[in-house]
Amino acid sequence: PSETRPTGAPRRVGIMGGTFDPIHHGHLVAGSEVAHFFNLDEVLFVPAGQPWQKEEDKVTPAEHRYLMTVIATAENPQFRVSRMEIERAGPTYTIDTLRQMRQYYGADVELFFITGADALGAILSWHNVDELFELAHFVGCNRPGHRLADPGLPEGKVSLVEIPALAISSTECRERVRKGEPIWYLVPDGIVRYINKTGLYLGDE
Ligand code: ATP
Ligand code: MG
C-alpha cells in the first residue's frame, strides 16, 4: 500500500534506453515530453553496454557514454542515470534490463520503456515479446523522418508520441565533430566541452 512507501518513492518510472554516443537534445526532449504526458515521477536514462544491433568496435567505451549522460541530465531533478546495462557483461538486451528493473522497483511501480520509433519497429523481432509487454508499457517517440508505416503492435501496450521537430542524431553529431563542424546547441554545453576535452570522435573514419 502507498502509505508504507517512503515519501517520494516513484510510482511511474520511465526507462530511456540508448547508446548515447553522444547524448543529445533529441534524447532529452523525448525524456521530458514523455515524463510530462505520462505523468512520470522520474526518467531513468540507461546507457547500453554493448548494443546487440551495433558493432563492438564502432561504439565509444561505456564509461565515456555514461559520464556524458550524467553531465547532460544532472540539472534535472526528474532525470537519473543507471549503470545497470554497462555493468552487465555481454550484449545488452532490453528484456534483461526490464526484468532487473522490475525486481528493483517492485511489482506496484509502473514502468514505461521509452524508445525511438525506429527502435520500436524492431520490437516484433525481439524474443519474449509477450513478457516484454507484461513488464512495461512501451512508448515510441517519432522524430522527423522516422514514421512507422504499419507498426502492427498490440493494442494498449504501445503508445506513439510526437516529439517536437528535433532532427538530431548521435551519428550526425559524431560526423560533425570529425569534420570540425559545431555541435553547439545540438547537445548540452557540457557535452560539447566534454567531447573537446577528451578528443572523442576526432579519429572516427
Ligand atoms: P545513432 O545515430 O548512433 O543511432 P541516436 O541519435 O539514434 O544514435 P540512440 O542512443 O541510438 O541515439 O537513441 C536512443 C533512443 O532515442 C533511440 O530509440 C532513438 O530512436 C531515440 N532518439 C534518438 N534521437 C531522437 C530524437 N531526435 N528525437 C526523438 N527520439 C530520438
Ligand atoms: Mg539510433
Image (cartoon, rainbow, N blue to C red):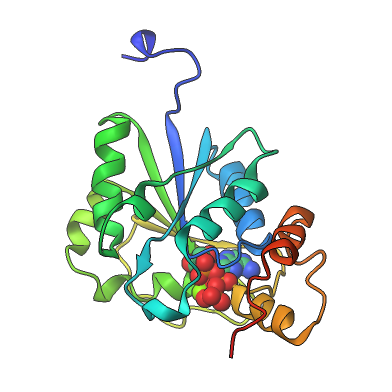
Q: Is residue 134 above or below residue 13?
A: below
- Quarter holding the C terminus is bottom right
Q: Residue furthest top?
A: 3
Image coordinates of residue 158 in percent, x first then y, are 39, 59
Say whether residue 77 is visible. yes
181 lies left or right of 11: right
- Quarter holding the N terminus is top left
Say whether residue 54 is visible. no
Image coordinates of residue 178 in percent, x first then y, are 70, 83
Q: Is residue 118 above or below residue 20?
A: below
Image coordinates of residue 189 in percent, x first then y, are 79, 56
Residue at (75, 66) in percent of width and height: 196
5 lies left or right of 100: right
Q: Residue furthest bottom?
A: 205
Front residue of this view, candidates 98 and 165: 98
Residue 12: image quadrant is: top left
Image coordinates of residue 25 in percent, x first then y, are 69, 60
Residue at (54, 79) in percent of width and height: 147
26 lies left or right of 147: right
Q: Is residue 88 above or below residue 110?
A: below
Residue at (73, 62) in percent of width and height: 197
180 lies left or right of 166: right
